[in-house]
Image: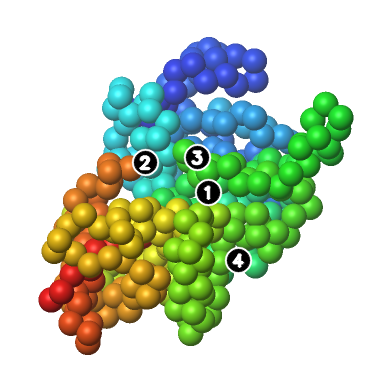
């Protein structure tokens, strides 16, 4: 017999706890069935984790208890053992989500996909599941398929797609109920949008800007200049051209962290933060030069052809590892940008005379 892979002790299923159900059917090595999702054409349910953690708040879905077979499920058992669950991680939702995210990617890689293709496939699956269950949309996959890889990456920051909740008709008691909005937060945040929203609606509400490569510098400069002049940010995210796999490998080498995506992003809030710390009249270091919108736009060039990649300091806001990416320009200045090593999300920049 193989060790039991059932890690959730008190999950409710069909009115009984998992422990009780397992006892009733007389199977020690068991799991919830993959099948059960009747809201789409898939043969598995996106709310189901293989180790038997089940989200029960999804509609029109029925799961049964089935035996784990050490021959038929041999590959899956091997994968589970490679990502063991401890008592600490079993009670930590973030750790369990990260575990599932890694295993889902590995399953796709076993089908012949490279790292980036596997990550994108998993992000699309997770985004589809959240749209389908949050907005009760049977056409969720069609919506996701209309998004570019860069747009999917921007919506699934750090591998966490937002949850979706339909807007409600405004009433006298709640006159603001109909407002469409994106509430940033842990695990991707929450998007309040119309139930019949299109892919374009999702990008609009989430303020995702994705243009052609040749337009990025112009868009970034215009956006950075507006923030520089007003001192305010609307929180919009701009998707930058993807970095090369060679550069991603170098970041992994110096930081010890594998980027989850090859697509960098710049958020208006981080541009404003840069100005507040290193902008006109704000730079305290005598060795550094004040940052302007003309420097912000250089992020594109630095990521395209960097001179040096180093391990940066921990990000003050998130505590995550950063990569310091630098380039010397023809005007004699050396500009260093800092991005989160795992997501390539821009955080800040410095400029000094070379």
Query: In the displayed structure, does residue 346 sit left or right of residue 324?
Result: right
Query: In the displayed structure, does residue 148 sit left or right of residue 294?
Result: right
Task: Report which quarter residue 133 is drawn in.
Answer: top right
Q: Are marks 3 and 2 in contact (CB under 8 Å)?
A: no
The answer to which of marks 2 and 1 sits earlier in the sequence is 2
Query: In the displayed structure, does residue 215 sit left or right of residue 39?
Result: left
The total of numbered circles placed on residues is 4
Per the model, the C-alpha gap separating discs 4 and 2 is 26 Å
Q: Residue furthest bottom?
A: 330
The x, y position of residue 80, in whole percent, is: 34, 40
Identify the element where label 4 is drawn.
loop
- The front one of 216 and 56 is 216
Q: Residue furthest right?
A: 172
The x, y position of residue 78, in whole percent, is: 31, 44
Q: Which residue is mark 3?
A: 185
Identify the element where label 3 is drawn.
loop
Per the model, the C-alpha gap separating discs 3 and 4 is 22 Å
Per the model, the C-alpha gap separating discs 2 and 1 is 16 Å
- Few, some or many residues within 10 Å of mark 4 (<14, 14–19, 20+): some
Q: Which residue is mark 1?
A: 161
Q: Are marks 3 and 4 in contact (CB under 8 Å)?
A: no
Q: Which residue is mark 4?
A: 147
| Residue at 47% from the left image edge and 69% from the top image edge | 225
- The front one of 79 and 256 is 256
| Residue at 74% from the left image edge and 44% from the top image edge | 179
Identify the element where label 2 is drawn.
helix
The answer to which of marks 1 and 4 sits earlier in the sequence is 4
Per the model, the C-alpha gap separating discs 1 and 3 is 11 Å
| Residue at 17% from the left image edge and 57% from the top image edge | 285
Q: Which residue is mark 2?
A: 99
């Amino acid at each position: 017999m193989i060790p039991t892979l059932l890690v959730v002790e008190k999950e409710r299923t069909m009115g009984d706890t998992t422990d009780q159900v397992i006892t009733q059917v007389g199977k020690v090595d068991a799991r919830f069935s993959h099948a059960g999702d009747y809201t789409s054409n898939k043969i598995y349910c996106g709310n189901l984790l293989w180790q038997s953690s089940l989200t029960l708040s999804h509609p029109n879905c029925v799961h049964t208890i089935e035996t784990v077979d050490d021959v038929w499920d041999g590959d899956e058992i091997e994968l589970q053992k490679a990502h063991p669950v401890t008592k600490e991680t079993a009670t930590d939702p973030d750790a369990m989500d990260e575990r599932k995210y890694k295993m889902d990617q590995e399953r796709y890689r076993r089908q012949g996909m490279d790292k980036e293709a596997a990550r994108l496939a998993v992000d699309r699956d997770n985004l589809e599941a959240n749209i389908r269950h949050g907005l009760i949309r049977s056409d969720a996959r069609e919506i996701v398929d209309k998004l570019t890889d860069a747009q999917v990456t921007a919506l699934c920051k750090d591998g966490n797609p937002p949850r979706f909740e339909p807007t409600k008709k405004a009433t006298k008691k709640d006159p603001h109920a109909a407002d469409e909005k994106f509430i940033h937060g842990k695990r991707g945040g929450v998007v309040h949008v119309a139930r019949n929203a299109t892919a374009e609606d999702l990008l609009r509400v989430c303020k995702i800007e994705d243009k052609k490569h040749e337009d990025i510098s112009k868009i970034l400069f215009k956006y950075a200049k507006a923030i520089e002049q007003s001192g305010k940010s609307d929180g919009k995210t701009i998707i930058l051209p993807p970095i090369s796999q060679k550069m991603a490998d170098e970041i992994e080498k110096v930081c010890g962290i594998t980027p989850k995506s090859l697509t960098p992003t710049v958020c208006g809030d981080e541009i404003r933060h840069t100005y507040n710390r290193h902008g006109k009249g704000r730079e305290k270091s005598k060795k550094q030069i004040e940052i302007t919108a003309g420097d912000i736009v250089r992020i594109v060039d630095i990521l395209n052809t960097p001179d040096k990649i180093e391990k940066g300091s921990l990000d003050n806001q998130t505590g995550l590892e950063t990569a310091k990416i630098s380039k010397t320009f023809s005007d004699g200045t050396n500009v260093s940008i800092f991005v989160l090593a795992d997501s390539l999300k821009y955080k800040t920049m410095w400029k000094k005379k070379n």
